[in-house]
Amino acid sequence: MPGVAGRSGRRPKPTAKKVLAGNPGKRALNKQEPSFTEITHVEPPRWMEPLAVQMWETVLPELLAQHIVCVTDLHIVEAFCTAYANWRSAQKLVVEHGAIMTSAMGSPIKNPALTAAKESMAQMVTTGALLGLDPSSRSRLTGGKKAKTTNPFAELIEG
């Protein structure tokens, strides 16, 4: 699986999951991890096809139960579910017609559905690694810190 640029190895477990597990590694938790508006339930978009809706209804409740997905992550979930539906559709064509097909000229060719399946799988992996659907990526982020003022008179103006 591809990792975040410049990083290799196992992806870290999300901070939320570490807390739920009692931080078994006893390593310092990311206290600067950003927090966005949590959601408790969202219906799948009406435009989604049935396979994408099926994945939405499978994945989203799990993410919500772990308090991992936020309102800012929904487009990533949509992209993942759509890529999943595309992958399943392409894979179904591969199963029906085989990996090798006969071209119009009668020679054997690779089934174009294999390419579509591969691209959809890559989209699933990529969206899974983005903030939202692959929650382990979230543990690498830090929230924006407020800049400390070095001006001793700033307190007088703010106060």
Image: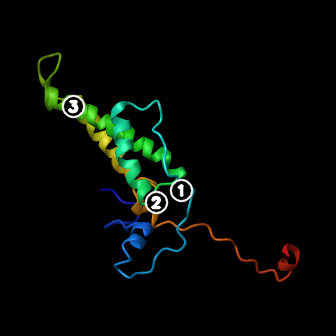
Q: Which residue is mark 3?
A: 92
Left or right, 108 with reference to 5: left
Q: Position of residue 52 (x, y in %)?
A: 36, 37
Q: Which residue is mark 2?
A: 67
Which quarter of the rendering shows the N terminus?
Answer: bottom left
Please report the residue visible at 38 percent of the width from the left and 37 percent of the height from the top: 53
Q: CA distance from mark 2 to mark 3?
A: 34 Å
Q: Decide: marks 1, 2 in contact (CB < 8 A)? A: yes
> Of label 2 and label 3, which has the lower sequence position?
2
Closest to the observer: 89 or 59? 59
Q: CA distance from mark 1 to mark 3?
A: 36 Å
The amino acid marked with disc number 1 is Glu
Please report the residue visible at 75 percent of the width from the left and 77 percent of the height from the top: 149
Q: Position of residue 34 (x, y in %)?
A: 55, 64
Q: CA distance from mark 1 to mark 2?
A: 7 Å
Q: Which residue is mark 1?
A: 38
Marks 1 and 3: which is nearer the front? 1
